[in-house]
Image (cartoon, helix red, strand yellow):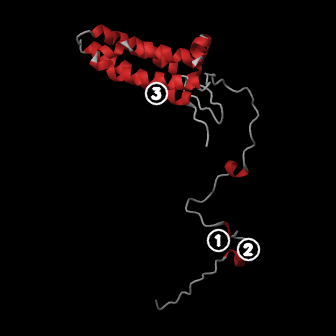
Amino acid sequence: MGKIEWAMWANEQALASGLILLTGGIVGVAGQFRDWQFAAYAVAAGVFVCLLEYPRGKRNKGTSVERTGQYCFTVCVKSFGPLTRNYYVRAFIHAGICVPGGFMLATILGCVCLGIASLIYLAAAIRGEHWEPILPRKDSARKPVADSINRPPQNPPPRPPAEMRRKRAEDLEGAAYVNPIPVTANE
């Protein structure tokens, strides 16, 4: 069985928790809840977490699928070097960010989710994982396109199997089908 890449799970969890924290902060500020300053902090923290977590990291094995528009954020996150590449640092940043969110009901769900993401990042760091950016490939060698892709089918589906398809009209004897079921005029 394959090795689990914990950082991929942590990235998805942290991005979702950043959005939840941002939403809870907006609700807290808009509703002018008691201690709404924590909600204002949650808005800023949610935006920071989303910007930090939007770019996916490269997987150790297999294919790495980047998010839409990820490249701009990848350049920003990559510029901070070991502060964003090391998962121990990310785990402690997320753990520190989530604490003030626990003082308000509107932001507590985002706080708990971010705390779970922090624990998953800590597990990824203990297993030796680190963040590598997904950069665009510079190879321009394209695979040749198959002939069937260049020439789409002429008849609509459902298509009969190749041996049952109608022959060309030049050979009238060969183009005729042989009906395996006898047809009588009485029926």
Which amino acid type corresponds to the residue marked 2 in the rendered image?
Asp
Q: Which residue is mark 3?
A: 13
46 displayed left or right of 167 = left
Measured in 3D between alpha carbons, the distance from the residue under mark 3 to the one under mark 2, in whole angstroms, is 65 Å
Q: For mark 3, give the secondary structure.
A: helix
Q: For mark 2, give the secondary structure.
A: loop
Identify the mark nearer the N-term, 3 or 2.
Answer: 3
- Whether residues under marks 2 and 1 lie with C-beta atoms below 8 angstroms apart, the answer is no
Mark in the foreground, 2 or 1: 1
- Identified at 26% across, 9% down, the residue is 35
157 displayed left or right of 172 = left
Tell me which corner region of the image, top left, top right, bottom left or bottom right, holds residue 130.
top right
Q: Nearer the viewer, residue 122 or 55?
A: 122
Measured in 3D between alpha carbons, the distance from the residue under mark 3 to the one under mark 1, in whole angstroms, is 53 Å
Q: Is residue 67 visible?
A: no
Disc 2 packing (10 Å; few <14; some 14–19; many ≥20) = few
Disc 3 packing (10 Å; few <14; some 14–19; many ≥20) = many
Q: Which residue is mark 2?
A: 171
Identify the mark nearer the N-term, 2 or 1.
Answer: 1
Q: Nearer the viewer, residue 139 or 86?
A: 86
Q: For mark 1, give the secondary structure.
A: helix
